[in-house]
Image (spheres, rainbow, N blue to C red):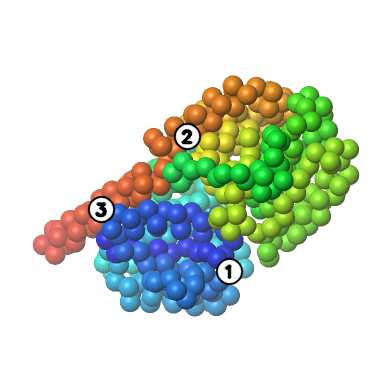
Amino acid sequence: MKIAWISSWPPRHCGIATYSLELTTALKSMGHEVHIICHTDGGSKEEKNIYPIINTQDCLWNEVVYQTVDDIKPDVVHIQHEYALYATNNDYSTSFLRPLFRWKIENNFPTIITYHSVFTTLNLGEKYFMNLSLDLASAGIVHEEYQKIYLPMNIGRVPNNVYVIPHGAKSLFKYKDTKTHLHLENKKVIGMIGWWEPNKGFEKIVKLWPDIIEKIGQEWILLVAGDARPGSTSGQIYKPELLKAIEDSSAKDRIKTIIGMFSPEKYDEVLSVFDMMILPYSQASQSGNLAHAFALGVPAVVTDLEGLGSEIRASNAGIAVSLNDKIELKNAIINMANNDELRKHYAKNAEEYVTEKIVWSNVAHKHTQLYQNRIEQLQHETTIETNGHLA
């Protein structure tokens, strides 16, 4: 199939860009032809079939996308949606509704939307966008079953075109000697990685660290890796607060920071030194960080939020703790750190979960099945219209 893929794209530092790169690589390996329509900061000159034309500051960006898709003449259009990627002046991506409407009317190919930000409770703007876009699209994809279950309560109807396909992960892989490269040889590492935003809650662990290290021993290091996302006002405010919490910690000699906007290779290298990962988020739908950790066999302690708790229960590869319960969070970290066999058990479960459920080849196969299903349905509807059986 020829697929027009609309998304952010590397070198943009964005989880959805990385997601798109990894999933489209798997789709290409199956023989599909993928054309990437991305933002103006995506792609490189040596890449083929890349169209860096999305500029949301231009009020006609949606028309440019429409014309580009028209030139590609795809078998299917697949949009990777997250509100911030396509919003102009906080308009909830409503500019995308115009090309979706035209594609539906023209009926030339199915349109698929993967929704990367779907919570159990949507605000008013999110409700309207979800309802309208699902009505115009051939199919919508969410990553977790609970996201599909809660949709009817949010949009006031039961959509019949929503499918659950999990966030994928790389095949199991290991890095050699990375602890030596990062000067962590003979250390055990509890790690946190990702964009530094207030909802990540990294400072909570930093503040708990003196009590934790007292219970688990001096061979452990807390590694805080990442940076504030460029252009994020909240991230730029949060970054000095997090660094100050580290500097003020009585256990700062047992804390290591690696600041940077990592390439995918560097990200994997840093994550590979973790003996366990902590995701103490206060808000999240799902996390690519968790999927990457599983691919490296890294168990996790997470707050029991939306997709985080759901993935822990599906994989049995870690511990989910109640939101805002610092004692439960601290005890879960201490218990996992002090129990080598428990970490090995969770790590084994993580590896099995990747291999059997969420490896990219499996996820790509599910996408291909959905594409083919929607294409066949569209062809059937077109045949009926041609025969004049529709009013």
Place of residue 92 in the rendered image (x, y in percent of width and height, measured from the top left): 55, 61
Along the polypeptide, which appears first: circle 3 or circle 1? 1
Which structural element holds mark 3? helix
Q: Is residue 219 above or below residue 37?
A: above
Residue bearing the label numbered 3: 372
The CA span between labels 3 and 2 is: 30 Å
Q: Is residue 391 left or right of residue 258?
A: left
Helix, strand or loop under label 1? loop
Residue type at tag 1: Thr
**Is residue 145 something one can see in this rendering?**
no
218 relative to 134 in the view: left or right: right
**What x and y, as percent, mark residue 391?**
19, 60
> Which of the pair 159/318 is nearer the observer?
318
Q: Which amino acid does the dot numbered 3 rest on?
A: Gln
The residue at the point 41 percent across, 37 percent down is 355
Q: Who's the residue at 43% across and 71% down the image?
A: 47
- The residue shown at (54%, 31%) is 347
Q: Which mark is residue 351?
A: 2
Q: Nearer the viewer, mark 3 or mark 2?
A: 2
Dot label at residue 88? 1
Relative to 301, 10 lies left or right: left
Question: What is the distance, in whole Å, between disc 3 and disc 1 at their CAs?
Answer: 33 Å
Judge the density around disc 1: few (<14), some (14-19), many (≥20) Cα neighbours within 10 Å.
some
Of 370 and 377, nearer the camera is 370
Instruction: Say whether disc 3 or disc 2 marks the residue closer to the N-terminus.
Output: 2
Viewer-nearest of labels 2 and 1?
2
Kind of residue indicated by mark 2: Glu
